[in-house]
Image: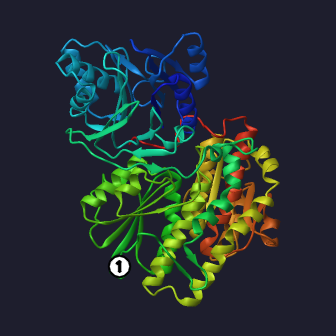
Amino acid sequence: MCGIAGYVGAREATPILLGGLQRLEYRGYDSSGVAVKNGGPSTVVRSLGKLAELAKRLEGAGVSGNLGIGHTRWATHGRPSDRNAHPHKVGPVAVVHNGIVENHVELRRRLIGRGRVFSSDTDTEVLAHLIDEALQAGEANLTEAVRAALRQVEGSYAVAVLSDVHGERIVGARRGSPLVVGLGDGETFLASDVSAIVGQTREVIYLDDGDVVELTRTGPKLSLLDGQPIDRAPKTITWNLAQAEKDGYPHFMLKEIHEQPRAVADTLRGRLRVATGDADIDGYNVDVTKLRRVVLLACGTSYHAALVGKFLIESFSRIPCEVDLASEFRYRDPVVGPDDLVIAISQSGETADTLAALKEAKLRGAQLFAISNVFESSIPRAADAAFYTHAGLEIGVASTKAFTSQLAALALLAIHIGRRTRTLGDAQAIEVARELAILPDKMTAALAGLGNVHDLAARYSHVHDMLYLGRGVNYPIALEGALKLKEISYIHAEGFAAGEMKHGPIALIDRDVPVVVIAPKGPGYDKVLSNLAEVRARDGQIIAVATQGDDSIEAMSDAVLWVPPTIPLLQPLLTVLPLQLLAYSAALAKGNDVDQPRNLAKSVTVE
């Protein structure tokens, strides 16, 4: 959510800023704006709505300059509007900001008491006033004024600041929200995500919490909030801009659904040892025989992956495993310590709730591990060791290939731990590894065989409610399937453990509430058949996800979405595929924006 772009160099800044912000549209936003400077005062142009509206306003504004900052805003404080869009300008100072100033009410009250007048409802405008106030108090240096302002702030931020009277420079800083510097020849870039600048440069420096950076044409100057200079080597980006294109698909989400076999194969590659039934986890050197338990922390779709991970870890290692919503973890006085392995899972590696939970676990002495799809993101850097999935850039807000890559990563980790606790024997380990190795091919076959899902989704796209049922390791997939439908089709959907149906949800079932039942062959299969019979007895319409060739399921269902057979604990990698396509197709039938659903953001960088 929210995106930052900044540029200082010899070229026109506006096209570069707009291009960078376009690369950040996948995060979700409701307004945008730029501040561009050419020697004299900066010009600020802002607009409610999509970047196309901002571009229209810029066409007639005559904006020109070789230095500028830009922003896409996802509303937190203050409704979406022109006046609340960033940048905010106070005196000579223009500011864009990701994050939340948690003490903004108190700061605003003090500033108003000193005669300051506010023109927006945002917490961000407080920063602009504080920086301007520091300059008026005698700070001759813009960087020092930014430091003085940030020392008064509680909360999270990634900021970019320029001034009308402080030359060709941009000052950036981060705490709890990502920011990256791009290095060019006679030019420097700033962004909240490397995807915004990868078309301009491949050499980047990732900022850490507490870093402040001054950008000029000659490059960045890094320091800490207390002014201590720091030196950090740049990293080279290995992926290219083409990975962000749709490659002929009508939507990024559909492209990413079909990229899942490749993403899972890439995540397994070089790590899975089929011949010995083992898995290599880079940088992971915990003595698992001394672990008391494993705690998985995640939010949203990653939380559903963690629920599957619990089944895998406990089955293969016999170590107790708990799953916590990261957004709740640090608010319940959690009991974790040195004998616990805490694993944080986040597609972006920047999920604010998950990062905060990981830091809480660190304070309590736990061993920390991260699973993420983004190299050098905040959560892996905060952990003792990290596992990077190889899903590639995921643009669609509703996660698909990042989810199945997380499942693959958790399977590898469970194998690795199970082999070292000696609870996963040779024969079972080799069987699991062999099946895991061929799963990408089965995923490809499953996707190729789901041509009927589009007509099926169109048939049910008018409904207001749907129920999803699953047992065992497929219960989390019921939750994930319901979440996907909610996210992009806006149909209300709920996932339940199938055994819980009689304990309340059965009251909702009638001919107007379709029920999706995840029913592959495996443990609990007979019980799921009983659930289907109970739904059928109440005139419920049944959409089943079932193992190919299951005549019993076909006879009891209104429609069946087939998947190939596999080991029960690995079924989620297959059973989730038809549910992703069902949600996509329902959203398409309703004419919704599939890649950028309303009110949602790709990377949730505020709590």
In the image: residue 29, left or right of residue 83: right
Say which quadrant the C terminus sits in. top left
Task: Where is residue 348? Give x, y as percent.
Answer: 49, 50
Q: Is residue 445 above or below residue 140?
A: below
Task: Where is residue 377? Give x, y as percent.
Answer: 43, 51
Q: Is residue 57 above or below residue 439?
A: above
Residue that label 1 marks: 287
Q: 163 or 479: nearer the eye?
A: 163
Give the SS element for disc 1. Answer: loop
Q: Is residue 13 visible?
A: yes
Q: Is residue 491 visible?
A: no
Task: Where is residue 419? Give x, y as percent.
Answer: 48, 83
In the image: residue 399, left or right of residue 69: right
The quarter of the picture where residue 116 lies is top left
Q: Is residue 524 above or below residue 431?
A: above
Bin the neighbour count of mark 1 within 10 Å (Cα to Cα): few under 14, some 14-19, many 20 and up. few
- Give the amino acid type for the residue marked by disc 1 in the picture: Asp
Q: Residue at x 34, y 50 (%)?
A: 356
The quarter of the picture where residue 210 lies is top left
Q: Is residue 197 above or below residue 426?
A: above
